[in-house]
Image (cartoon, grey):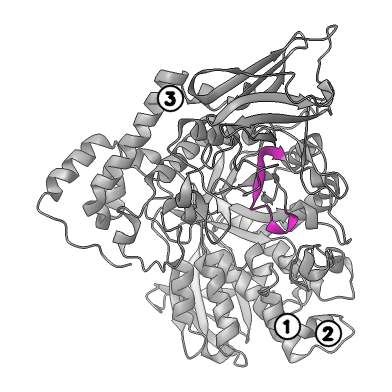
Amino acid sequence: MAAPAAADKGSEAHLEAALADVPELARLLEIDPYLKPFASDFQRRYKKFTQILSDIGENEGGIDKFSKGYETFGIHRSADGGIYCKEWAPGAEAVFLTGDFNGWNPFSHPYKKLEYGKWELHIPPKQNKSVIPHGSKLKVVITSKSGEILYRISPWAKYVVRESDNVNYDWIHWDPDDTYKLKHSRPKKPRSLRIYESHVGISSHEGKIASYKHFTSNVLPRIKDLGYNCIQLMAIMEHAYYASFGYQITSFFAASSRYGTPEELKELVDTAHSMGITVLLDVVHSHASKNSEDGLNMFDGTDSCYFHSGPRGTHDLWDSRLFNYSSWEVLRFLLSNIRWWLEEYCFDGFRFDGVTSMLYHHHGMGQGFSGDYNEYFGLHVDEDALIYLMLANHLSHTLYPDSITIAEDVSGMPALCSPTSQGGGGFDYRLAMAIPDKWIQLLKEFKDEDWNMGNIVYTLTNRRYLEKCVAYAESHDQALVGDKTLAFWLMDAEMYTNMSVLAPFTPVIDRGIQLHKMIRLITHGLGGEGYLNFMGNEFGHPEWLDFPRKGNNESYHYARRQFHLTDDDLLRYKFLNNFDRDMNRLEERCGWLSAPQAYVSEKHEGNKTITFERAGLLFIFNFHPSKSYTDYRVGTALPGKFKIVLDSDAPEYGGHQRLDHNTDYFAEAFEHNGRPYSLLVYIPSRVALILQNVDLPN
């Protein structure tokens, strides 16, 4: 990373003031002294963050109460069966409630106007029964300043459905007598985070939208067996357009009805918890759908309300609306949304989508981040959005100390994953987004013999000290149509003809299977403090992902996951699946993700070898397409006897079985590559090995 420009003469005074105002800033600057010229930025952000918390305390009784907006906003049944309704519509001239309960009379139930753009409505009970039964359809009716009559779904709606061929969603009052009762406690925060990125709708091999129940019964056991301890659920917050992959949210408090009911989602999360699996929600607070009839846009007849007015309120690339994070009621809405998913559905944390877009006024569009620190500070930073993220992380970790938050940030903003007490963003992890790009670049642009070992190691280890990263070789982004999965880059058309064990083991399939395993293992072992895989990619899913749309005649053929392929003993997909399972299980046993960053002792360009140590294990990779090495010396910090604990060349992984697992390897006091001990190994071409020192206590 480039060092920042020299500090001005007044920087010492600014530094002292910042250190006095931010409790733990000294610790952050000790870790990264290059941040010193920007200490006043951390001071300003921290003071604004604490001021908003103070204001919330003074005006709302604290963030605990402030973040329970869903308990009063929207519609609620009172103890006597009456109904209480509340909305925030500052641009409205009048507000009404209509629906099945009043024969769709638009004006029979007017809201009363309150201060600060709020409106409320009390509906008395009817013969001690709720006047609005569970399952009723509803609409908020807005009379705009210009006299328009607008039919809207409450921003706080908890359940919306789209019936048959309807274009828009209907708001359904969800208030069942028989709610799902959670049976299992949340798991403790994993020591090592191994994430299975999942989409419920595509989780079946059938050409249809799969259900929460299907995922619970059929996919969760596979995830557990594969050794993943966390699932990240995508596309849960309701979105009108299925092909948006869940990134054009229309109803932020509604679990998507296309997969089933809210109670069935609760059962899914609860079942995962019974297996010891942490469940994260892919939360989208970076933007919102432009839909107005079944979304937030133009809710009160104005282009502002929840969003910035004018050009600042529109994301040109995503064609979506952008939240006004400086608005008091927008903060209430978004922070309450965080709490809703944590408490109503018992999610264990979040992966925040589109964080780069939030952090900068330019939204990252047309920007290449070089690492120059000036790119992360200054007027181009949207500090209102950054402060919101600090508040969201503060809330999540205050309510549930074991909760996990992950930032999808491609810019690499310093301190985003540092505690808010240091003036940081408060995230637990960031996604290591450069890693999948590097693998795609290598497979697209370079012959195997031209791969640069030093560049691979640099990409996998280039992360900020004490800011945790989730490494991944590929995610859903690389699975989408228009791109290719790693398996497709490696094997392409032969995946359709030569993945049977009865077919010839062609050079293309052989190369693909061996490199698929090696790429995953080195990413897992060297790339971060967490690991992520998108569902199906672990076994080299043979087809990309494409949701039904006009361009493919609304076909579901590519919007599915063919898990059954791994169960067919005659297909080679089982080899990749076996390796992924055993790689995760070994990490569970040895804990390299939670260990300090690896020590890389060798990255040999001529031999195409990489050797590193982490968590007391010795990782050895030979990426050479044809050369195997006998008596190859590798350095280690530890004396004693070593044994093979993972071998990508083993037959159960589709390898060539060139190594004897009964072999003992003895480290001698012979310095090599800066390590005090070394040992001799046989390392065949395109093979990855992990050796463990068996003289050490487990």
Closer to the N terminus: mark 1 or mark 2?
1
Q: Which residues are magenta?
A: 241-254
Task: Residue 270 in the image: state x and y as whole percent.
Answer: 75, 37
- The residues tagged by marks 1 and 3 sit, at their Cα atoms, a distance apart of 56 Å
Which residue is at the front of the view, 602 or 380?
Answer: 380
Q: Please rate how many residues cluster around mark 3, counting C-alpha atoms within 10 Å: few if below 14, some from 14 to 19, many from 20.
A: some
- The x and y percentages for residue 276 are 70, 42
What residue does disc 3 label?
Answer: 56
Q: Amino acid at mark 2?
A: Asn
Q: Secondary structure at mark 1?
A: helix
Report the mark closest to the observer, 2 or 3: 3
Q: Which residue is mark 1?
A: 491
Mark 1 and mark 3 lie on one chain; the one further toward the N terminus is: 3
Task: Give the number of the mark in front: 1 or 3.
Answer: 3
Q: Position of residue 268 (x, y in %)?
A: 78, 41
Mark 2–mark 3 contact, CB under 8 Å? no
Instruction: Sort mark 2 into few (<14), some (14-19) or many (20+) by Cα contacts within 10 Å.
Output: some
Residue at position x 33%, y 61% from top? 375
Quarter of the image for residue 402 reads: top right
User: Looking at the picture, which amino acid does disc 1 mark?
Assistant: Met
Contact, CB < 8 Å: mark 1 with mark 2? yes
Image side of residue 128 versus residue 687, left or right: right
Label 3 secondary element: helix
Q: Is residue 133 visible?
A: no
Question: Mark 2 sits on what residue?
Answer: 498
Q: Nearer the viewer, residue 482 or 642?
A: 482
Q: Residues within 10 Å of mark 1 (few under 14, many from 20)?
A: many
* Residue 242 among magenta residues: yes
Q: In terms of sequence position, does the residue under pointer 2 or pointer 3 come before the other?
A: 3
Q: Height in image: 274 above or below 135?
A: below
Q: Residue at 37%, 55% (x, y): give it.
A: 414
Q: Is residue 559 magenta?
A: no
